[in-house]
């Protein structure tokens, strides 16, 4: 796993498949997403290498239920005692009560979907010991007040997290950077692409400077303008595949 400093308070944790972000406030940490199955221990090691202890991580905020984002959440919660949070509509799948819905793949996305599934460790993930359910408009106690935005489309319970005090936005898989050249693109392998584009338009209005995507390199300046251009994409994509 690679650990990349993006800002003094923000690190990107990059796994062979999937990624997560670590936000640092004075004296406590917050993890955004938790990587695939098996990521719990490497995340704890990364936290230690950065001079903290896993217990300093107070919460794990999950952007949606897909396994490359929640796979390590239960493992890491068991190691750290961190609270795990997800939107209420994705919560049953994070808890492992039943499998989540498969994406409604376009023809061109099918090989991509198959490849994504092949790369993931066999499941199911260890469910978190408990799960706090989130709704649109919730404000979480980190990053100077972290706003939860319900942005359906990729999944029904997808969320973004925005830190107005820092201009930092976590988009989950609603936006990705294309693996080929790092260009930001609307997320793929969605339940509803039109809804996803409407969600991107909502994100574009936040005035974010930094946008951290579910896959690929973040945008570290001028994020709102980038999101505005993506939100204007056609409902039927011709575009570049990214990743689940
Ligand atoms: Zn993903
Ligand atoms: Zn996803």
Image (cartoon, grey):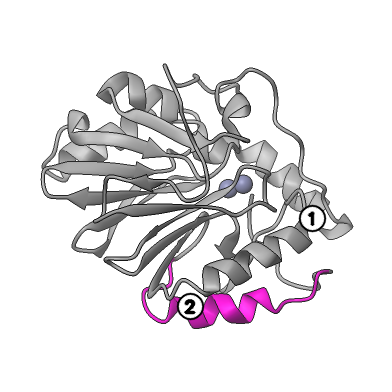
Q: Which of the labelled discs sits on residue 109, or is there none?
A: 1
Secondary-structure class at tag 1: helix
For disc 2, the marked residue is 224
Quadrant of the image occupied by residue 92: top right
**Residue 79: percent from left, percent from top:** 29, 21
Q: Is residue 193 above or below residue 210?
A: above
Q: Is residue 215 left or right of residue 193?
A: left
**Residue 153: percent from left, percent from top:** 70, 53
Q: Which residues are magenta?
A: 218-235
Q: Is residue 55 magenta?
A: no
Q: In the rendered image, is residue 39 in sight?
A: no
Q: Is residue 232 magenta?
A: yes
Comes first in the chain, label 1 or label 2: 1
Q: Is residue 41 above or below residue 155?
A: above
Residue displayed at 84% across by 59% down: 108
Residue displayed at 52% across by 48% down: 136
**Residue 243: percent from left, percent from top:** 63, 54
- In front: label 1 or label 2: 2
Q: In the rendered image, is residue 157 in sight?
A: yes
Secondary-structure class at tag 2: helix
Residue in the foreground of this view, choosing between 121 and 87: 87
Residue displayed at 45% across by 76% down: 223
- Residue at mark 2: C-beta within 8 A of ligand 1: no
Q: Is residue 149 above or below residue 39?
A: below
Residue displayed at 70% across by 79% down: 232
Report the quarter where the N terminus lies: top left
């Amino acid at each position: 796993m690679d650990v990349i400093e993006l800002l003094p308070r923000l690190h990107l944790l990059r796994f062979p498949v999937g990624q997560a972000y670590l936000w640092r406030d004075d004296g406590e940490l917050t993890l955004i997403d938790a990587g695939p199955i098996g990521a719990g221990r490497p995340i704890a090691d990364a936290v230690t290498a950065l001079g903290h202890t896993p217990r300093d991580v107070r919460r794990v905020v999950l952007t949606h239920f897909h396994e490359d984002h929640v796979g390590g959440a239960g493992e890491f919660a068991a190691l750290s005692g961190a609270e795990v949070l997800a939107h209420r509509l994705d919560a049953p799948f994070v808890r492992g009560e039943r499998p989540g819905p498969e994406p409604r793949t376009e023809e061109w996305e099918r090989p991509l979907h198959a490849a994504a599934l092949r790369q993931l460790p066999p499941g199911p993930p260890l469910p978190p010991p408990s799960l706090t359910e989130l709704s649109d408009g919730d404000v979480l106690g980190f990053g100077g007040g972290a706003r939860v935005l319900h942005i359906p489309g990729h999944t029904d319970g997808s969320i973004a997290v925005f830190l107005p005090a820092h201009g930092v936005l976590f988009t989950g898989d609603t936006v990705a950077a294309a693996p080929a050249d790092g260009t930001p693109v609307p997320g793929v392998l969605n339940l509803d692409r039109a809804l996803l584009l409407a969600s991107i338009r909502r994100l574009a209005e936040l005035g974010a400077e930094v946008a951290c995507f579910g896959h690929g390199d973040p945008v570290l300046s001028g994020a709102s303008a980038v999101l505005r251009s993506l939100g204007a994409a056609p409902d039927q994509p011709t575009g570049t595949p990214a990743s689940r």
